[in-house]
Image: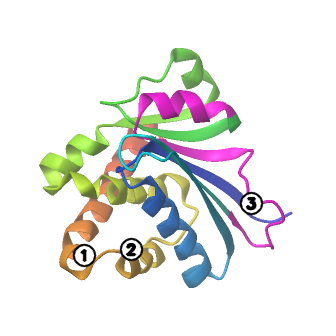
Amino acid sequence: MGLHYELRFVGIGGQGNMLAGTIIAEAAVYYENKYATQVPTYTSQVRGGPTKADVIISDEPIQFAEATHIDFLLALDQRTYDMYKKDLKEGAIVLVDSGLVNVPEEDHKKWDVYGYPIVKTAKYDIGNVVTANILAVGMTVELTGILDKENVKKAIADRVPPAFLDLNMKAYETGIEIAKKLKAEKGK
């Protein structure tokens, strides 16, 4: 079997997890000629309810669209982290907003955990909290190495309104740089 990579983006409604998953899936399909699925799960609450976007990327047709052996998890909320971490593979990469999610010590032993204040960085360093998801996409791409960074930029440009494109590209590039530093600190 060739490439088969499962990603899960979790948080609360309004944080942009669905869009993050869509951008990753579309970059894989439209710009890398891979197969991808994106399966969203959310409650009837427009804002504040638990959300989950599962993405599978493969170089072969995907027979079962539900992610069950997660290689990468992004969590921007404690409740959804606790709810949706159960499908993580041993050694999976976990990225959490360190200001919003507390990762238990036993989880650090099972998974490759990275924490960073993603929402705070988007709000204060980028200048708009709504860019947190794109900041996280940049971090995801750098930590996983699953997609070409330029192809993800194209997918972002396809999805983000033109008036906010420069701000989101700044968030994306910042996310990549943050993840590079986090990996260097771990010696990876």
Q: Please provide percent x and percent y for residue 128.
A: 17, 56
Q: Please provide percent x and percent y for residue 120.
A: 21, 41
- C-alpha distance separating marks 3 and 1: 30 Å
Q: Is residue 142 magenta?
A: no
Q: Are marks 1 and 2 in contact (CB under 8 Å)?
A: yes
Residue where numbered disc 3 is placed: 65
**Pair 3/1: label in front:** 3
Q: Are marks 3 and 1 in contact (CB under 8 Å)?
A: no
Quick one: label 3 or label 1, which is nearer the N terminus? 3
Looking at numbered disc 2 in the image, what kind of residue is underneath it?
Ile
Mark 3, other Cα within 10 Å: few <14 / some 14–19 / many ≥20: some
Residue at position x 27%, y 44% from top?
119
Residue where numbered disc 1 is placed: 165
Give the residues drawn in magenta, as a range. Answer: 57-86
- C-alpha distance separating marks 1 and 2: 8 Å
SS for tag 1? helix
**Splitting the image into 4 quarters, where does residue 138 fall?**
bottom left
In what quadrant of the picture does the N terminus appear?
bottom right
**Splitting the image into 4 quarters, where does residue 89 fall?**
top right
**Pair 3/2: label in front:** 3
Q: Is residue 188 visible?
A: no
Looking at numbered disc 1 in the image, what kind of residue is underneath it?
Leu
Residue at position x 25%, y 56% from top?
130
Q: How many marks?
A: 3
Residue 156 is marked as 2
In the image, 26: left or right of 101?
right
Give above or below for 16 relative to 68: below
Mark 2, other Cα within 10 Å: few <14 / some 14–19 / many ≥20: many
Looking at numbered disc 3 in the image, what kind of residue is underneath it?
Ala
Q: Is residue 81 magenta?
A: yes
Mark 1, other Cα within 10 Å: few <14 / some 14–19 / many ≥20: some
